[in-house]
């Protein structure tokens, strides 16, 4: 019988630290609305651990995996990508991360993984996919693609009670906007609360899917606006969280097997070095002289990026993709902000690989920013032409980076060449 364990470690920072995720938000956190956590699930000698932060970087992932007590290549670390947490990646997202928080985050990951492994007990696995709750919206294209459905993996103790439940949904955790000054996991908090209430004694783990171009309906530009939006409230986050949890609970579950597999692959991604940075900097400084406050802050962030960019030549970066199969429930995990089109191409390619639930995750083991599919470069926009400045990267990633990641994770999972993951889908 499979043995598995689960653990939760609180990582909620004190008030006063800088928050992360909105350029329009300047004040520090004033307190906590709900706890930020690291949640680890160990199955055999494989594991996934998810933290309520906007992202983790590759260096932290590597150190944690080496210290976890498990085979490092069989461990995946991910972030929920909440915009209600502190800065969690040094040198990224236009702010100064707190060293004590970063040290605590790293320790919490290691503690959660070791604790889950040390408390492992016999379990059986069930899996299924819940119906689409109708929450996610493509924020770049009206009626654009979203990765629908709620994959579910349930782990049951020998007595039949639920020990843990892992679910995923592909939607940005940005229900709360820049006027929120409380630490929060956003809607994933309410997903977990609802699931744990329905399954007494179980730990719920939420892993965010490929939500780079998907949220609850507002544009990316709206997140740069400091104006309060009453529709983006904790009450709305609760409604959304409960809808996703209800979909997970409605999933028809089937018994899964006992075979445990895991694999990883490394991918070298290049940058698109096509910006005239000196010209951009000169234009921003001219505009800054008469810009309103919010625009001025944006221009300051970009100008600071340009100053640092002049000393940072774009060099390829190595990214890690991972895959696991837990009794037939499959997990494909990629770094950064992956778009829905990429996830859907992987679903099509993997459709014949088994009836178990398929989790396709973003924000795993690193977060180098948005990684659009090739088809999206023609449309430009924040995610394609601007976001790398906030992430502190020397340039945007080159076209076909998403396709290279998808191909690598598909092959790591045992798949063969498939046209769906080597070409992009065009929008009308």
Image: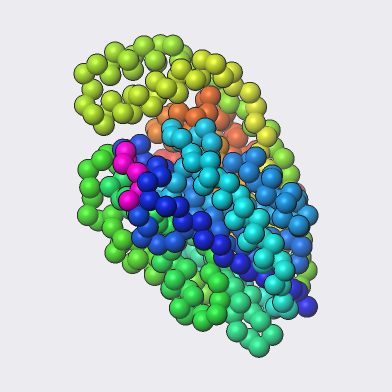
Span of residues in magenta: 25-30
Is 266 located above or below residue 80 in the figure? above
Q: How is the protein colored in the picture?
A: rainbow
Residue 208: x and y in percent read: 51, 55
Q: Using the image, determine if residue 201 lies above or below residue 46.
A: below
Picture layout, residue 58 above or below residue 349: above
Q: Position of residue 50 (x, y in %)?
A: 57, 57
Outermost residue toward the bottom in this view:
159
Q: Quadrant of residue 246?
A: bottom left
Q: Is residue 122 visible?
A: yes
Query: What residue do we see at 52% from left, 61% from top?
Result: 10
Whether residue 253 appears in this view of the structure is no
Q: Is residue 335 left or right of residue 15?
A: right
Q: Nearer the viewer, residue 425 or 207?
A: 207
**Residue 257, image x and y in percent?**
74, 74
Image quadrant occupied by the C terminus: top left
Q: Position of residue 354 (x, y in %)?
A: 69, 65
**How would you classify the magenta stretch by its main secondary structure?**
loop
Residue at position x 39%, y 54% in the image: 183
Q: Residue at x 72, y 55 (%)?
A: 68
Q: Residue at x 55, y 72 (%)?
A: 203
| Quadrant that contains the N terminus | bottom right
Q: Splitting the image into 4 quarters, where does residue 282 fall?
A: top left
Count of marks placed on residues: 0
256 on left or right of 229? right
């Amino acid at each position: 019988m499979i043995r598995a364990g689960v653990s939760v470690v609180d990582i909620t920072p004190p008030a006063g630290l800088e928050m992360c995720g909105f350029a329009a938000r300047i004040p520090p956190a004033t307190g906590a609305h709900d706890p930020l956590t690291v949640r680890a699930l160990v199955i055999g000698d494989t594991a996934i651990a998810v933290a309520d932060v906007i992202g983790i970087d590759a260096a932290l992932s590597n150190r944690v995996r080496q210290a976890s007590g498990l085979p490092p290549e069989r461990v995946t670390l991910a972030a929920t990508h909440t915009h209600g947490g502190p800065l969690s990646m040094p040198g990224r997202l236009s702010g100064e991360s707190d060293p004590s928080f970063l040290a605590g985050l790293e320790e919490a990951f290691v503690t959660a993984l070791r604790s889950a492994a040390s408390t492992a007990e016999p379990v059986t696995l069930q899996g299924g996919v819940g119906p689409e709750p109708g929450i996610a919206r493509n924020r770049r294209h009206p009626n654009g693609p979203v990765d629908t459905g709620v994959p579910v993996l349930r782990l049951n103790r020998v007595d039949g009670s639920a020990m843990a439940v892992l679910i995923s949904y592909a939607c940005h955790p940005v229900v709360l906007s820049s006027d929120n000054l409380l630490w929060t996991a956003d809607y994933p908090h309410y997903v977990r609360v609802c699931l744990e209430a329905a399954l007494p004694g179980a730990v719920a783990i939420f892993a965010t899917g490929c939500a780079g171009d998907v949220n609850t309906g507002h544009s990316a530009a709206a997140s740069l606006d400091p104006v309060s939006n009453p529709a983006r409230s904790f009450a709305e986050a609760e409604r959304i969280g409960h809808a996703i949890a209800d979909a997970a609970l409605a999933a028809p579950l089937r018994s899964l097997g006992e075979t445990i597999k895991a694999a990883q692959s490394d991918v070298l991604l290049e940058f698109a070095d096509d910006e005239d940075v000196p010209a951009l900097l000169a234009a921003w400084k001219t505009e800054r002289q008469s810009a309103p406050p919010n625009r001025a802050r944006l221009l300051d962030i970009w100008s600071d990026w340009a100053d640092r960019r002049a000393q940072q030549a774009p060099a390829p970066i190595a990214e890690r993709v991972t895959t696991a199969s837990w009794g037939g429930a499959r997990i494909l995990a990629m770094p950064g902000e992956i778009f829905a089109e990429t996830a859907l191409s992987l679903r099509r390619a993997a459709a014949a690989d088994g009836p178990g639930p398929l989790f396709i995750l973003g924000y795993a083991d690193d977060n180098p920013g948005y990684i659009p599919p090739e088809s999206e470069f023609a449309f430009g926009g924040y995610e394609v032409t601007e976001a790398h400045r906030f992430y502190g990267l020397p340039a945007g990633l080159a076209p076909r980076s998403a396709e290279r990641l998808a191909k690598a994770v598909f092959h790591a999972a045992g798949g063969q060449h498939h046209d769906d993951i080597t070409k992009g889908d065009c929008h009308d």
